[in-house]
Amino acid sequence: MKSKKINRILMLLENSTYPQDFRVRNEATSLTTSGFFVIVICPMKMGQKWNERINNVQVYRYPPPPLSAGFFGYIIEYGYSLITASLFSLLVLFRHGFDVIHAHNPPDLFVLIAVCYKIIGKQFVFDQHDLSPEMYYARFGGQGSRLVYKSLLMFERLSCKIADHVITTNDSYKRLGIERNYLTESSVTVVRNGPILDELPTLNYVSKEKNGKTALCYVGDMGFHDGVDYLLRSLHCMIKKYSRNDFFCTLVGDGDAYKSLRVLAEELQILDHLIFTGWIEHNEVSQYLMGADICVAPRTLEQLQ
C-alpha cells in the first residue's frame, strides 16, 4: 500500500465510540505506528468532544441517534448513522483527504458510502467484527423476519464483493466468508482480538472479594446477543442445583442489555455472587483479567461462535 502512496485511512465505526472500542483502537494505533494517518468517525458519548486528536489519531464524533427500541429502533439508528457518517466523510475528504475507507461492522451499511467513494478511486476495507445476519436472529431469539435476514445477507455479500480486502476476527468467519460470499484465501485476513501483553501488570491483582473463592470473569459487550444471560442462568444453576457457593463472578463491560441483566440477576437471587463494574478504562481491565481464575465466553454456537 505505501508504495502507491496510500497513507490516509478513514475508519467508520457505528456500534461503539473511540477510543473505547478496543479492537478499533488497536488497529488505528498499529496503522499510525506504521506511518499512516488515521481518521475515525464514530458516535459521541456524553462528555466527549466532537473533534480531537488522540495519540495521533484524528477523531470526529457525531451526536448519538435518538434512543428507540425494537426493529424500527434499529432502522432509525442505522439510517441516522449512515446519513451522519456520510456527511462527516465529506468533511474529512475536504479537510484531510483519505485514500482508504476502513468500515467496521455492524452494521454492514457503510458499503453504501464506500460505493460512492470507489467511483473516485478510493479503496475499501471491510472489517467484519460480527456476522450481522446471525446477530439479528440471536438478538430477537431466532424469531426475526426472514426478509430482514435476507437483506442483511445481501449487504454482507455486497460489502465483501465491493471490498478491496476483508478483515475478520477468526478462522470461522474467514471460512464462512469464502463459502458464503465467494472470497478467496488471499482476499481475507484474520486479525484477532487480544490483550497487549506489555500492558498487563507483572503481579496478579487479587480482588478483596476473592477470600479463597474461585474468581470468574467476563469482559466484553453486554448486548442482547452476547449470551451474558446464559452465564447468569448457569451461575444460578451452580448455586441452586449443585449448592456451589465457593465462587464469585465479575462482569466487566456495558451495553444495551446491561440494565436487564442486573434485573435478571436480582430475579435469580444471585447478586451476592456478582460484581457488575460497568464500563471501565482499558488500563483497569487487565487487573480483572490477571485476578481471574477462569475467564468465561458465554456465547453459544448459535450466537455467532
Image: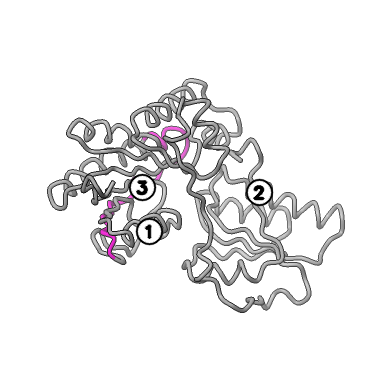
Mark 1: amino acid: Ser
Q: In the picture, which quadrant includes the C terminus?
A: top right
- Numbered tag placed on residue 223 in the rendering: none
- Disc 3 is placed on an element classified as loop
Q: Bounds of the magenta span?
A: 56-75
Please identify the residue farthest to the left as the structure is shown. 94
> Which residue has dot 2 on it?
298
Residue 211 in percent (x, y) is at 75, 77
Q: Which numbered disc, 3 or 2, marks the residue that appears first in the sequence?
A: 3
- Disc 1 is placed on an element classified as helix
Mark 2: amino acid: Pro
Q: Which of the two marks, 1 or 3, is nearer to us in this view?
A: 1
In this rendering, would 234 be left or right of 190?
A: right
Residue at horizontal 51%, vertical 25%?
Answer: 180
Residues packed near mark 3 inside 10 Å, few (<14), some (14 to 19) or many (20 plus):
many
Q: How is the image coloured?
A: one colour
Q: CA distance from mark 1 to mark 3?
A: 17 Å
- Numbered tag placed on residue 13 in the rendering: 3
Residues packed near mark 2 inside 10 Å, few (<14), some (14 to 19) or many (20 plus):
some
Q: Which numbered disc, 1 or 2, marks the residue that appears first in the sequence?
A: 1
